[in-house]
Amino acid sequence: MNKGQLISEVAKKTRLTKKDTANAVNAIVETIKKNVKNGVTLVGFGTFKVSRRKARTGRNPQTGEKIKIKAKNVVKFKPGKGL
């Protein structure tokens, strides 16, 4: 399911216009993005949080050459019991 399909399904269930539903979905996504560094928990759905991925050595799949992969922050999702 993509974002457009999600908006259509929510619009059907709430009987709102697609424009109003799109605004609501976009607001939810933006709010999660802004607050994910502190952790976002949606009870019954799951938790979004930022995790640090360590630097590591990888391989170029075409040449087999070793490459260094830098450390970075990634967002992880842990599903709740409802899922």
Image (tube, rainbow, N blue to C red):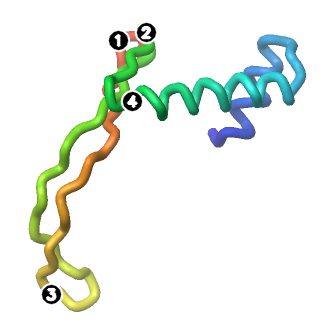
Tell me the CA gap for discs 2 and 3. Answer: 44 Å
SS class, disc 3: loop
Q: Which amino acid does label 4 sit on?
A: Val
User: Is the N terminus in the top left, top right, bottom left or bottom right quadrant?
Assistant: top right
Q: Earlier in the sequence, mark 1 or mark 2?
A: 2
Three-letter residue code for mark 2: Gly
Instruction: Name the residue at 12% across, 60% down.
Output: 55
Residue 67 to residue 83: above or below = below
Disc with the residue nearer the chain's start (2 vs 4) = 4
The secondary element bearing badge 2 is classed as loop
Q: How far apart are marks 1 and 3 (CA)?
A: 42 Å
**On the image, which quarter does residue 3 sit in?**
top right
Residue that numbered label 4 is attached to: 36
- Label 2 near label 1: C-beta < 8 Å? yes
Residue 33 numbered tag: none
Residue in front for this viewpoint, 23 or 10: 23
Residue 37 picture quarter: top left
Of the two numbered discs 2 and 4 in the rendering, the one whose residue sits closer to the viewer = 4
Q: Could you tell me how far apart the alpha carbons at marks 4 and 3 are, in whole angstroms?
A: 35 Å
Between tags 1 and 3, which lies in front? 3
Residue bearing mark 3: 65
Q: Where is residue 71 in the image (x, y as percent from the top left)?
A: 18, 57
